[in-house]
Amino acid sequence: MEFEPLIISSNFDYYNSIIMKIIPISAGNFHCDGGALFSVIPKKLWGKVYPADENNFTKLALRCLLIDYGEQKILIEAGIGNHFPEKHLQNNGVENENCLEESLKKNGYTTDDITDIIFTHLHWDHCTGAVKNRNGKLLPVFTNAKYWCSKKQWEHSKISNPREKAAYHKGVLDFIFKSGKLNLVENEGELFANIEVRFFDGHTPGQMIPFIRYEDKTVVYMADLIPTSTNIPLLWLAAYDLYPVKAMEEKELFLNETAKNGYILFFEHDFYTECVTVSKTEKGFVLKDKFTWLERG
Ligand SMILES: [Zn+2]
């Protein structure tokens, strides 16, 4: 199957004439082992800043972001959906995995309203909720949406490696491919007006991170580039990063830019913290302000 060429709208005047709305949308929660979330950092340290339960489970959010541009409504990520057996849900402490539709409804939207879905990458907790399983038959959740993902990540998901293999749901990815609605992004740059995407390879090759210009600020959707606000110190990487040294180098460059330009970091996975700004100090990178999207100044 051939893909449509990457279409970048040139009608930016249209976008500039309407108000962009940014709305956090919940697709549920899940858990991972605290050791996996903080890798080589001892629990004696991370346990002071991110809570864990008696099973050492740390609670993570599946926080999508809706960008409402009037006729165009872009959703970043799609959560988990209903594809996984009970054992998988229990092992990953998954909660409310089918609440995405309800969360959209609470904010006045339906799944049919969504015109585009950006997948930062294709690990199960980021994209499988775009498809639903009804009695063994797969169906799209967002009937009018196109899907966007980096070409590099798409190709990587096909070859992957034994360590990462379980993170990709072949059935869902094949369904998305066959839908004919998948757009593979080859280059960094403006994907939609005021939404630039950039590629990072440390977590998984071709993770596509959205940088959203909103009023006079830049909001960066963190995905797994920095999973929680407590992962900001340089060495506090998650063990899920496929190439940790690369991930650390990318993180340092990114945090320098963040501190310099006052970016707002929006966390997909931090259950306790939605947004932060960052400062660079003698002790390294630290949180400057912490707030929810609604509370932002
Ligand atoms: Zn991931």
Image: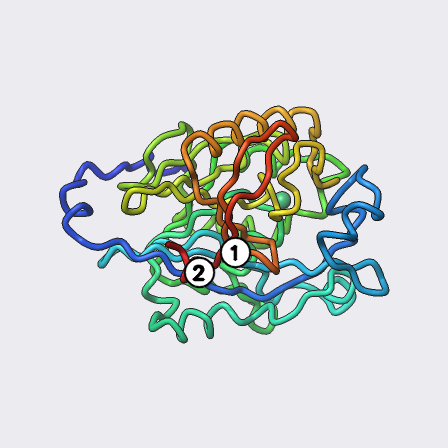
Q: Residue at x 51, y 65 (%)?
A: 26
Residue 274 numbered tag? 1
Question: In terms of depth relative to the viewer, which is nearer, 216 or 141?
Answer: 216
Query: As displayed, is residue 292 above or below residue 260?
Result: below
Residue at mark 2: 24
Q: Residue at x 46, y 41 (%)?
A: 149
Residue 279 at least partly seen:
yes
> Is residue 257 rendered to the left or right of residue 284?
left
Q: Residue at x 22, y 55 (%)?
A: 19
For disc 1, the neighbor class at 10 Å (few under 14, some 14 to 19, many from 20) is many
Marks 1 and 2: in contact by CB < 8 Å?
A: yes
Residue 283 numbered tag? none
> Is residue 231 rendered to the left or right of residue 175?
right
> What is the secondary structure assignment of the residue under circle 2?
strand
Q: Residue at x 55, y 49 (%)?
A: 174
Residue at mark 2 to residue at mark 1: CA–CA distance: 9 Å
Residue 5 at least partly seen:
no
Q: Position of residue 292 (x, y in %)?
A: 47, 59
> Is residue 50 rendered to the left or right of residue 192?
right
Q: Quarter of the image for the C terminus: give it.
A: bottom left
Question: In terms of depth relative to the viewer, which is nearer, 235 or 96?
Answer: 235
Label 2 or label 1, whichever comes before in sequence order: 2
Query: As displayed, is residue 112 above or below residue 74?
Result: below
